[in-house]
Image (cartoon, grey):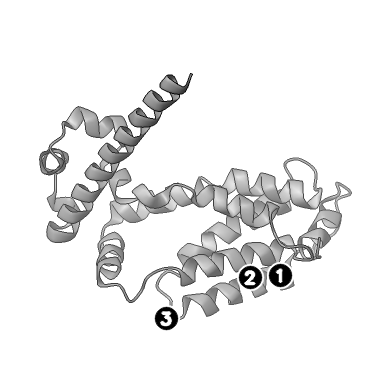
């Protein structure tokens, strides 16, 4: 069993190294020449790998740009499920998104170049938006679980959607942190003002803003 585990460990490390080599080569070429001016074959040649190998690790050319996207969805869910005692779901989610924004390395020249490339390439903007919103279902389910709302609760789904969209809304704002807080302030003030439909959603809404 130990030998099998060691073999699997080596195999996984080799796969990780291959994936990283492709992502590094792609990013270097994209930043040097522009995303649209680099072909998949050029990336594989720079990494000394085959096109077949590239598509075993990445489903598309766009995916090479966002290789570091792993774990973002799990972090969103954890922000809700593992929030501090006394912290509401609503404020835990807001604070997590603010921290994410603050962690962007705006003073790093390479990061600025990366953001400029993404912002000037419609295909990358669309892909980034689509990949980010894929976390919506898992986040909504975590909110439902945390608040005791009924399965499929519309308000929990709406909060998940609006929270995720907020990141895109503040992308070009001169003060993204302040803009994020203003969006969540707006959501909090307007949240749950409609009439109760008797489904339990109104009770769950109160729990979104109440400490656990």
Q: Residues within 10 Å of mark 1 (few under 14, many from 20)?
A: some
Residue 137 vs residue 89, the one in the foreground: 89
Figure check: 185 above or below 4: below
User: Gap between marks 3 and 1, in whole Å?
Assistant: 23 Å
- How many marks overall? 3
The local secondary structure at tag 3 comes to loop
**Residue at (46, 23) in percent of width and height:** 2
Q: Which residue is mark 1?
A: 188
Q: Which residue is mark 3?
A: 174
Rendering coords of residue 89 (x, y %): 72, 60
The local secondary structure at tag 2 comes to helix
**Residue at (70, 63) in percent of width and height:** 90
Query: Does 58 sit left or right of 52 as displayed?
Result: right
The extreme right residue here reads: 198
The local secondary structure at tag 1 comes to helix
Task: Confirm or deny contact between disc 2 and disc 1 (CB under 8 A).
Answer: yes
Q: Which residue is mark 2?
A: 184
């Amino acid at each position: 069993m130990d030998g099998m585990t060691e073999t699997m460990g080596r195999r996984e490390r080799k796969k990780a190294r291959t994936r990283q080599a492709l992502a590094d080569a792609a990013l270097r070429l994209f930043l040097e020449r522009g995303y649209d001016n680099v072909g998949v074959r050029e990336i594989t040649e720079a990494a000394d790998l085959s096109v077949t190998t590239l598509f075993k690790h990445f489903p598309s050319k766009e995916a090479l740009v966002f290789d570091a996207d792993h774990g973002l969805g799990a972090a969103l869910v954890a922000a809700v499920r593992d929030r501090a005692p006394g912290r509401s779901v609503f404020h835990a989610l807001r604070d997590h998104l603010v921290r994410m924004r603050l962690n962007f390395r705006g003073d790093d020249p390479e990061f600025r170049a990366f953001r400029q490339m993404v912002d000037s390439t419609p295909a990358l903007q669309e892909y980034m938006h689509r990949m980010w919103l894929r976390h919506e279902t898992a986040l909504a389910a975590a909110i439902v679980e945390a608040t005791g709302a009924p399965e499929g609760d519309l308000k929990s789904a709406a909060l998940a959607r609006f929270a995720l969209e907020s990141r895109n809304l503040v992308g070009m704002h001169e003060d993204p942190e302040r803009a994020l807080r203003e969006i969540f302030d707006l959501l909090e003030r307007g949240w749950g003002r409609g009439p109760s439909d008797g489904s339990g959603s109104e009770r769950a809404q109160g729990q979104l803003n109440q400490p656990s």
